[in-house]
Amino acid sequence: MQGAALEKTMNNIQLNLEKTMNNIQLNIDDAAPESASPEILATFERKRSISMLRKITRAVEQSPVTIMITDTHGNIEFVNPKFTEMTGYCPQVAIGQNPRILKSGRTPPETHKNLWSTITSGKTWEGEFVNKREDGNLFYEHAKISPLRDDNGTIIHYLAVKEDITEKKNIMEQLMHSQKLETIGQLAGGLAHDLNNILSVVNGYATLALLEMDKDMAQFEFINQITIASSRAAAITRSLLTYSRKQETNLENLNLNDLIRSFGTFIKRTIRDDITFSLSLSDDTLCVSADTVQIGSSSRYRI
């Protein structure tokens, strides 16, 4: 009878213990109940540790950046799913390999030397790599690599947290290219403005000289060629001013036949003697709305 009573009492204690544990809301930010028994406290701490570990695992697996852990020799021991998404290497292939499988040859050797000297001395290294995916495509990434230590302070692993910055790099390159073009445009505009002033003087004096000369004079045609050349040069400077956005576009109704015909003389002077040049123009009037300077410059450049 006493044995049966003792067994019943132990069963009641077990039921009460399980009921108590089920009523405890486990949260890593909660403190253990002060009135709980040592067994409950131990179970509570164990479950809280498991809960914390699960959260850390989810954070690593769902991280928007690459997380990689290597041993002290640089051999990969862990990669998260973002690593596979960025590089194309699955964990089964990457683990056991050295991160040099990502080397593209575009990262300076000094970068890798500085990296190893920094992390082996116990410091965190930060920098950029130009790496290569499994499919051979290049990508840029920004990395922070830190040593992981044991309880005694000994370095046992290295942790790399890396972000794909390829898109940022491309945007920066486009921005720099735009800035270069803007600088060239400003320079071209300044030069065109000065040249236009000089050409105005040349054309002006040449025109005055023509007014004082008889068309039958031998020098007349020479001076006339000066005015024609200076006018063409002035058109080119206006094109540069338009390119640099210092002159507004002036749209007119133009006949393409007239424009093409006006360049006939220019083309004949520039081609070799063994080349025959001829024009075959449309009988219809081909009208377009365009800027005379811009369409003229475009035609000359294409020729």
Image: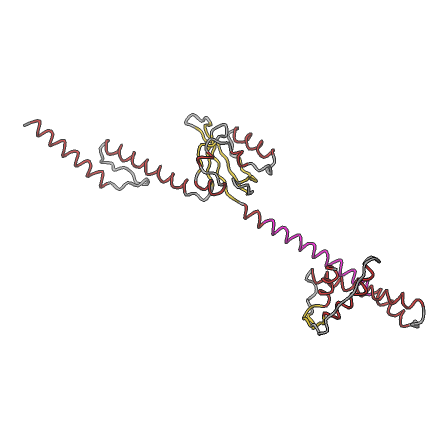
Q: Quadrant of residue 44?
A: top left
Number of marks: 0
Position of residue 74 in the picture relative to residue 18 (left or right): right
For this rendering, which residue is in front, 180 or 292? Answer: 292
Q: Position of residue 18 (x, y in %)?
A: 20, 37
Work out which residue is located at the far right of the displayed protein and give it.
Answer: 217
Identified at 17% across, 34% down, the residue is 14
Q: Position of residue 275 (x, y in %)?
A: 81, 58
For this rendering, which residue is in front, 38 or 295? Answer: 295
Report if residue 194 lies within the magenta region. Answer: yes
Q: Quadrant of residue 235?
A: bottom right
Q: Quadrant of the N terminus?
A: top left
Report if residue 197 lies within the magenta region. Answer: yes
Work out which residue is located at the far left of the displayed protein and give it.
Answer: 1
Identified at 72% across, 68% down, the residue is 292
Name the colour scheme.
secondary structure
What's drawn in magenta, residue-wise? Answer: 172-200
State whether the magenta stretch is mostly helix, strand or loop. helix
Identified at 32% across, 36% down, the residue is 50
Q: Position of residue 190 (x, y in %)?
A: 74, 58
Q: Quadrant of the C terminus?
A: bottom right
For this rendering, which residue is in front, 112 or 117? Answer: 112
Position of residue 297 in the picture relative to residue 91 (left or right): right
- State whether residue 155 is above or below residue 222: above
For this rendering, which residue is in front, 214 or 163? Answer: 214
Q: Position of residue 149 (x, y in %)?
A: 44, 29
